[in-house]
Amino acid sequence: MIRAGLVGLVLALAACSTPDQTQRDLDQISNREQAALGQNEGQANPQDTCGMAAYQHLMGRPESEIDRSKLPERARVIMPGMMVTQDFAPSRLNIRVSPDRTVASIYCG
């Protein structure tokens, strides 16, 4: 009886947990952000208000290769599971890192 109760409790707690974001989730977020900014693949973003073009060489690179001392003052390196504000700041550079610790997206906001 106690064992059945414990199993039920464990299952209920597991159902309430939030899974980690997958690479596919991060790609979808990045695609939505780029679409909102009007960026088309293979085309420079006319709304590059944060200087993100200068950091595109980091795409797919390990997070350890980001030289944080050379990033703009308001830049954010967003690690998996990290909580960030959802306010939109066009001059802020965002570098999103995937769960495998590589740069998944770079965008203004």
Image (cartoon, grey):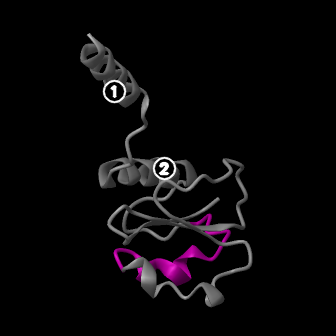
Identity of the residue drawn at 37% across and 41% down: 19
Looking at the rendered structure, the secondary structure element under dot 2 is helix
Front residue of 4/87: it is 4
Name which quarter of the figure residue 94 lies in: bottom right
What is the crowding at mark 1: few (fewer than 14 residues within 10 Å), some, or many (at least 20)? few
Where residue 93 sits: x, y (%)? 63, 69
Front residue of 81/7: it is 7
Quadrant of image for the N terminus = top left
Give the mark nearest the N terminus, 1 or 2.
1
Q: Determine whether 104 is above or below 66 in the image.
A: above
Is 87 contained in the magenta span? Answer: no
Is 49 contained in the magenta span? Answer: yes
Identity of the residue drawn at 70% across and 52% down: 88
In this picture, residue 37 sits left or right of residue 63: right
Where residue 91 sits: x, y (%)? 72, 67
Mark 1 vs mark 2: in front: 1
Identity of the residue drawn at 63% across and 54% down: 84
Looking at the rendered structure, the secondary structure element under dot 1 is helix
Amino acid under disc 1: Val
Quadrant of image for the C terminus = bottom right
Where residue 42 sits: x, y (%)? 37, 68
What is the crowding at mark 2: few (fewer than 14 residues within 10 Å), some, or many (at least 20)? few
Identity of the residue drawn at 30% across and 15% down: 2
Front residue of 68/51: it is 68
- Please give the residue where the numbered disc 2 appears in the rendered image: 35
- Point out the stretch of residues depicted in magenta: 46-61
Marks 1 and 2, how far apart in space?
40 Å
- Please give the residue where the numbered disc 1 appears in the rendered image: 10
Where residue 25 sits: x, y (%)? 36, 47
